[in-house]
């Protein structure tokens, strides 16, 4: 069984020493409520809930899984009791407005909570996690009446939410969607259709489930321009939220799948189900992106969670497992072999997971500041600017951190050797649960095309230029005065390299449109390694400054510097390989005739 200890010390380092959350909170309305004492108390209680309630259910939930019978889903033993404690603790509405039953604290503080919950038990955490997406979508696009009913109940957590996009005949290509919504005389709609892969689509945790559903109204334009968004509850209610009758929504089955067994992945059927339009007609996909971007940031957390949990469980094993002798001389003469922590390749795998976990945490926590601005901005211009900045970072966070999280899970299994492949230690579960993260909410390939296509080329390089400028600004400043100048030099050099490769790639695309697609994955991964380098440079600078001043725990800061050295020496150079493949011939990817794929 895996163990989990919330990384409270590292969280404190990131939000206070590196990112200065207090200065950030001072600039947003209501931010003063998030005092250091308040933050410490929330993180401490979330850590306690995650460690003591959720983590013990992780392996048992995987073994028991969800059970479907006659359209109803029973979650694994202990899940319902844990959810009742979640409701009792008021956790769901932590970062949502008080007028709808929330606590009005910053969105970034809620994200810390999500990391702790997700790392302890990702399957369980998906139930309240999907509700957050529904809450954000309702808050941005709902009418006051809709928010008063649905958002209030979701903040209570007595109702949960889902996102219903995919259908049996279409995956991410939502332009092929066929679900129908027929208008009714009372202003409601009757929805008919089938949605698949609906996480948390049916369960026994809450009294009602609010489905956020994409469908087409009669005469709607073809493709994505004819999609509208609807609120479709499992149970209908009166205006006060009292349940009245069952809606025409049913769970046809749940999927048998590789991982996340404790979360029900459902086929949801809508049979003349009553729904209510959310937002404007035929603008549903744009509105749903509020939900999707929430889910993508949530999935980035899953990548971070995989790296964190993999590292936490692999390093103690490496300390206790004795096998063979160290090449540099015997380390444990009283044992038949030395602890495997003394073998270089084991250290490589452990340090890789550690670097990804700690670097990923800084990346996500910094991006969360934009969420705060989006909610509390004084002007629409500020709100749009924050949304655009977060939109640029989202595909990097989602794709890069899930790819690296999967690598961390694989490496941690390898540290255990054959014992990592069996269920006893729980390492293979981390990998199985993490495998979906590179696929749902848009595969890595889709995120890569979104980044280079929409966020760079179609944007006219404006957001990309801002991204580069941020890296240059830090790099040049610390190149002259910093304590880790060579990291700043590397940051500047790799940023220059990406800029040059990007210009060349776009120039090739003017002659061959496939050039961008063929290089998109490489561009995204280079961007990811470069982004993480920026945060490791920041963390190293802070740690070196603290050490020089004799402040705090010297071992903690020394470990930061040693992990930063590993990142810059062993992981960042991977970006050079991606630069080389970005430069390579498009024909090497697109040249083979499809017929010849079958010739072996």
Image (cartoon, rainbow, N blue to C red):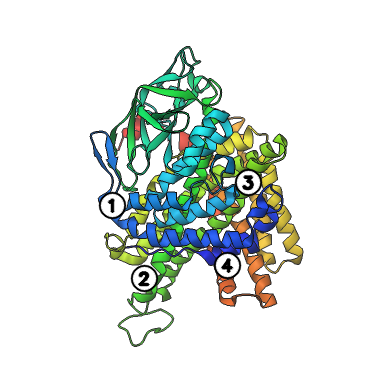
Q: CA distance from mark 2 to mark 1?
A: 29 Å
Q: Quadrant of residue 490?
A: bottom right
Q: Nearer the viewer, mark 4 or mark 2?
A: 2
For mark 3, what is the residue? 372
Crowd around label 3: few <14 · some 14–19 · many ≥20 (10 Å): many
For mark 4, what is the residue? 565
For marks 2 and 3, the one nearer the N-term is: 2
Tag 4's secondary structure? helix
| Cβ atoms at labels 4 and 3 below 8 Å apart | no
Question: Disc number at residue 176?
Answer: none
| Cβ atoms at labels 2 and 1 below 8 Å apart | no
Tag 1's secondary structure? loop
For marks 4 and 3, the one nearer the N-term is: 3
For mark 1, what is the residue? 77
Q: CA distance from mark 4 to mark 3?
A: 32 Å
For mark 2, what is the residue? 317
Above or below, 458 relative to 327 = above
Q: Nearer the viewer, mark 4 or mark 3?
A: 3
Where residue 477 appears, as percent x and y from the top left, is: 75, 60
Is any part of residue 231 visible from this angle? yes
For marks 1 and 4, the one nearer the N-term is: 1
Q: Nearer the viewer, mark 1 or mark 4?
A: 1
The answer to which of 355 and 588 lies nearer the viewer is 355
Tag 3's secondary structure? helix
């Amino acid at each position: 069984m895996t163990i989990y200890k919330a990384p409270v010390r590292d969280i404190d380092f990131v939000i206070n020493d590196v990112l200065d959350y207090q200065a950030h909170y001072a600039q947003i309305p209501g931010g003063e409520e998030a005092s250091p004492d308040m933050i410490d108390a929330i993180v401490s209680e979330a850590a306690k809930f995650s460690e003591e309630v959720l983590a013990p259910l992780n392996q048992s939930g995987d073994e028991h899984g969800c059970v479907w019978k006659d359209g109803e889903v029973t979650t694994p033993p202990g899940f319902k009791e844990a959810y009742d404690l979640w409701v009792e603790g008021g956790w769901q509405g932590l970062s949502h407005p008080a007028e709808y039953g929330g606590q009005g604290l910053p969105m970034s503080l809620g994200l810390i909570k999500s990391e702790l919950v997700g790392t302890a038990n990702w399957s369980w955490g998906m139930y309240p996690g999907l509700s957050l997406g529904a809450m954000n979508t309702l808050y941005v696009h709902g009418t006051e009446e809709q928010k008063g009913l649905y958002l209030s109940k979701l903040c209570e957590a007595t109702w949960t939410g889902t996102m219903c996009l995919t259908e049996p005949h279409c995956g991410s290509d939502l332009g092929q969607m066929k679900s129908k919504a027929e208008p009714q005389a009372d202003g409601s709609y009757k929805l008919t259709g089938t949605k698949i892969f609906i996480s948390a689509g049916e369960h026994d945790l809450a009294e009602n489930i609010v489905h956020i559903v994409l469908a087409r109204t009669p005469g709607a334009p073809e493709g994505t321009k004819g999609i509208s968004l609807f609120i479709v509850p499992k149970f209908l209610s009166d205006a006060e939220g009292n349940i009245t009758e069952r809606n025409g929504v049913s769970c046809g089955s749940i999927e048998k799948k590789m991982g996340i067994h404790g979360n029900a992945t459902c086929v949801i059927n809508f049979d003349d189900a009553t729904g209510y339009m959310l937002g404007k007609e035929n603008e549903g996909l744009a509105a749903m992106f509020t939900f999707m971007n929430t889910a993508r940031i949530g999935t980035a957390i899953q990548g971070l969670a995989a790296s964190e949990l993999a590292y936490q469980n692999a390093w103690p094993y490496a300390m206790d497992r004795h096998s063979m002798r160290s090449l540099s001389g015997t380390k444990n003469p009283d044992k038949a072999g030395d602890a495997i922590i003394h073998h270089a390749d084991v250290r490589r795998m452990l340090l890789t997971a550690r670097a990804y976990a700690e670097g990923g945490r800084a990346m996500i926590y910094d991006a969360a500041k934009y969420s705060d601005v989006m909610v509390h901005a004084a002007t629409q211009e500020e709100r749009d600017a924050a949304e655009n900045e977060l939109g640029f970072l989202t595909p990097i966070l989602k794709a890069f951190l899930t790819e690296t999280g999967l690598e961390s899970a694989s490496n941690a299994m390898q540290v255990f050797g054959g014992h990592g492949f069996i269920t006893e230690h729980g390492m293979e579960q981390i990998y199985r649960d993490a495998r979906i993260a590179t696929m749902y909410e848009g595969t890595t390939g889709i995120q890569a095309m979104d980044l280079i296509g929409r966020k760079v080329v179609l944007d006219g390089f404006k957001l990309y230029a801002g991204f580069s400028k941020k890296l240059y600004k830090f790099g040049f400043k610390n190149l002259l005065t910093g304590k880790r100048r060579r990291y700043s030099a590397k940051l500047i050099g790799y940023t220059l390299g990406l800029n040059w490769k990007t210009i060349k790639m776009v120039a090739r695309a003017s002659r061959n449109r496939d050039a961008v697609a063929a290089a998109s994955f490489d561009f995204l991964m280079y961007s990811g390694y470069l982004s993480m380098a920026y945060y490791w440079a920041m963390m190293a600078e802070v740690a070196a400054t603290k050490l020089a001043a004799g402040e705090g725990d010297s071992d903690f800061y020394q470990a930061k510097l040693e992990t930063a050295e590993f990142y810059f020496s062993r992981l960042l150079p991977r970006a050079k390989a991606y630069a080389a493949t970005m430069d390579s011939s498009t024909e090497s990817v697109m040249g083979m005739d499809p017929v010849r794929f079958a010739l072996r």
